[in-house]
Amino acid sequence: MSTTFLPCGIYHQEYAKEHAWWQTPFIKGKMILLLIILFFIIPFFADSYGLSLCNQISYTILGAIGVQLLIGFCGQITLGHAAFLAVGAYTSALLILEFPWPAFMLDWGLAYPVSIIVAALMAGIWSVAFGLSSARVKGFYLILTTMAAQFIIVDFIITQYVSQIGGRGQAFSIPPETIKIGPIIIDSDLKVYFMMLFFVIICTAVLANLVRSKVGRAWIAIRDNDISADVMGINVIKYKLIAFFVAGCIGGIAGSCWISNLAAISPEHFPWSWSLWLVGVILIGGVGSIHGTIFGSIFMVLVMEGLQLLVIPLADIYPKLLMDFLFIKEAAFGLAICIFMIFQPYGLSYRWQQLKNYFNLWPFSY
C-alpha cells in the first residue's frame, strides 16, 4: 500500500512540504469547501441579520488577532488593545472627512484605502510607544501600563481633543457614500462582509507566516522564557517592540474597517471592556493558536447573540430583563471564561485539534 494512504502519519522529504499550509489532498479539499462557503454560500443565502453577525465576527477576529499575537505568541499581557482600534478608526475617519484630498483621489476611490494604511501605521506607532514599558516591566506591571493606553488615548486624547475637531462634539458622522474603494461604494452589509473577509484572510495569513519565521520563533522563545531567549542571543526588546507594532497595525486595520459598518463613530465604541472582551475571546478559543482566535470570536458573538434572542421573549414577562441585558451579558461573559478555564483550559482550538486527529488517524486513533 502506498504511504500516502497510511493513517498513522504524514511524511515529507522536503522542508518546504513539511511547512506547507495544505499538506494533503484532503486538507486542500476542506479549504476549498470553506472558501466556497465563505465567498458564495454565506453572501448569497444569508439575510441582512446574518451578514451583520458575520461582520461582527470578522471585526472581533481582527481585534483579537493582535491580542493573540501579544499574549499567545509573545507572552506580553495587554488589557488596552481597544485603544489601538480607536486610533485606527479615528485616523481613518479624520483622513476621509477632514483631509483635503486631490479631486482624483476622491474620484478614483483611493482616499479610504490610503487611510487604512495610515491608520495601521499610526496604531502601530502608538502601540510601540506603550510597548516600550515592556523593556523594563512584565506581568502585572505590564498589564497596568497597557491599561494606561486605554485611559490616555481614548478617555483623554480622543474624547477631549480629537472628537472636537470640526466642531462635531463627541461623534463623527459618517455620511453615506463616504466609504469608497475604487469604484465600489461600501454602503451595504454584503459589501462590508466582503471587505472584512478580505482583511481577515490577509491578517490571518500574515500572522501565520510571521509565526513560522525567524521573528515568530523569537516571539515564542520570549514567551516561554525571556531570560533564556536573551542568553541565546535574541534581542528581546527589539522583538517585543516588533510584536507591539504588528499587533497595533492589525488593530488599526480593524478599527478602520469597522467605521464602514457605522453611521457615526464615538469614543463609546471603544470602551475598556472591549479590551477585556478580546482577551476573553482568545482564552476561550485557545491561547497561542490562530484557530483559537477564530473559534473564540465565533463562539462569543453567537453565544451573546443567542442570549439576547432568549432574553427578548422573556422581556414580555419580566421587562427588567431587557433593561439589565448589559449586565446579563457581562455576567455570561465572566461565567463562560470560568467554565472554560475549569473544564477546557486549552480552549476550543485544542478540542478542534483532537477532533481532527481522531478522523485523520481513524481507525487507529487513540
Image (tube, rainbow, N blue to C red):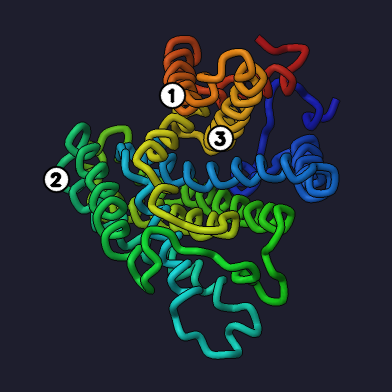
Say whether residue 230 is left or right of residue 213. left
Mark yes or no: residue 31 visible: yes
Q: CA distance from mark 1 to mark 2?
A: 37 Å
Give the amino acid at mark 2: Arg
Q: Position of residue 209 (x, y in %)?
A: 53, 51
Q: Position of residue 313 (x, y in %)?
A: 67, 19
Give the amino acid at mark 1: Phe
For the residues bearing labels 3 and 1, Cβ distance under 8 angstroms: no
Q: Residue at x 61, y 29 (%)?
A: 305
Of the image marks 1 and 2, the number of the one nearer the N terminus: 2
Q: Which mark is residue 136?
A: 2
Foreground: disc 1 or disc 2 = 1
Q: Secondary structure at mark 1?
A: helix
Q: CA distance from mark 3 to mark 1?
A: 20 Å
Q: Residue at x 75, y 45 (%)?
A: 48
Q: Which residue is tagged 1?
A: 327
Q: Secondary structure at mark 2?
A: loop
